[in-house]
Image (spheres, rainbow, N blue to C red):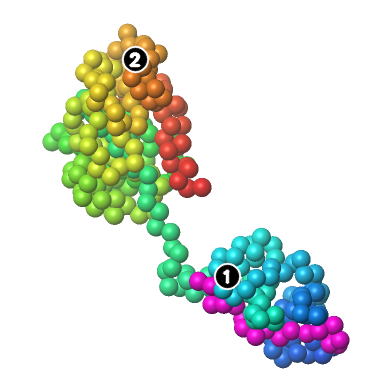
Amino acid sequence: MRIADIMTRHPLAVGPDDAEADLQRLAALGRLHHVPLIEDGRLTGMWVVSAEGRLVMVGPEQVHQTNGEADADEAFEALLGGKEAVLAWEDGAPAGVVTRADAMSVIRSALARGIGRRHGRPVVVRLVGPADSAKGALLRRTIPLIRHVRSGVVRAAAHAPDAEPAPGRLHGVPVIEAPEAHWRAGLHRALERLSDVQVVLVEDADGPAAATKGVGEDHQVLVVAAPDLDSLVQSHLSDVAAVVVTRLDAAPEVDMDEVRADLNANDPGLPVFGVAVERDDRGLDEWRDWMLAQVLPANR
């Protein structure tokens, strides 16, 4: 879109010899609020009608000067940057003016047509791991910790027949049962059912302690119970964004510093968190901070 597409064309312009009273009358008759003052083919100021109806002169430095073929973004940036108006020139004469009122008219029209509406895709974090890795417990503990962002939950893991069914909401956030969400198409359909959320936690189908083929998530997090650390295979971790070792209370002999050192030896910088999850809050603050760091940059 060009400035010519949004400007008020053929603006009334006055010279230094025009009386202020005549200008006041012309402004009132034409309901004008911005009148360029032109002298010897150049802008020397602009008359502006204040909210009280008085004429006020602003200097040329308060007016952004360009041409009608320039991108309309240039006008919006100038007005948002504090310029009083935008004056477009053509063949040495004022061709059009863009004011904040013109910009607001464009915005209102766009909003009425749904143009520019932001349908931001949420950040999707998929928790993968074995059935006994406490993925569900980690998810339940995580939701309250990231309460400052709008969250949603997709449960794709199979649950025992006597397990408590997933509620429609968990800690106030929507929960969707979608066993097919461990496939790309299934995850896409599940995400369509969650609106206006910033992050979606997916409890994936149970599987081995290894990364799986991506299905459209932003971050794949491997969850493994501390007693099962021996099942980890380094070559299976290449596609994970982080590793969470759960149930530390069930394996007090596990030294998380050693676990991190071993995993980082082959994958430097891989975030590795150790949490108890079910009995205490050990390690949850570090996990929370990592989660928020993945979400917040997408919403700046």
Specify start and end residues of the magenta stretch as a single range: 1-20
Which percent across, then down, holds residue 158? 17, 37
Please say if 274 is above or below 294.
above
What residue is drawn where x is 45% and y is 64%? 116
Q: Quadrant of residue 61?
A: bottom right
- Specify few, some or many for label 2: CA neighbours under 10 Å numbering under 14, 14-19, or 20 or more: few
148 vs 42, nearest the viewer = 42
Q: For residue 114, say whether it is visible.
A: yes
Say which amino acid is labelled 2: Asp
Q: Label 2 belongs to which residue?
A: 262
259 to 178, vertically: above or below: above
Q: CA distance from mark 2 to mark 1?
A: 58 Å
Q: Check disc 2 and report its element: helix, strand or loop.
A: helix
Residue 294: percent from the left, percent from the top? Answer: 43, 38
Residue drawn 69% across and 62% down? 82
Residue 118, magenta (yes or no): no
Depth check, mark 2 against mark 1: the one in front is 1
Q: List the single residue furthest toward the top.
A: 253
Looking at the rendered structure, the number of numbered marks drawn on it comes to 2
Residue for badge 1? 70
Element on which disc 1 rests: loop
Relative placement, left or right, of 147 versus 210 is right
Determine the residue positioned at 26% across, 37% down.
Answer: 203
The amino acid sitting under disc 1 is Ala
Q: Are marks 2 and 1 in contact (CB under 8 Å)?
A: no
Left/right placement of residue 81 relative to residue 128 reads: right
Can residue 33 be seen here? The reply is no
Residue at the left extreme, as displayed:
161
Is 6 magenta? The answer is yes
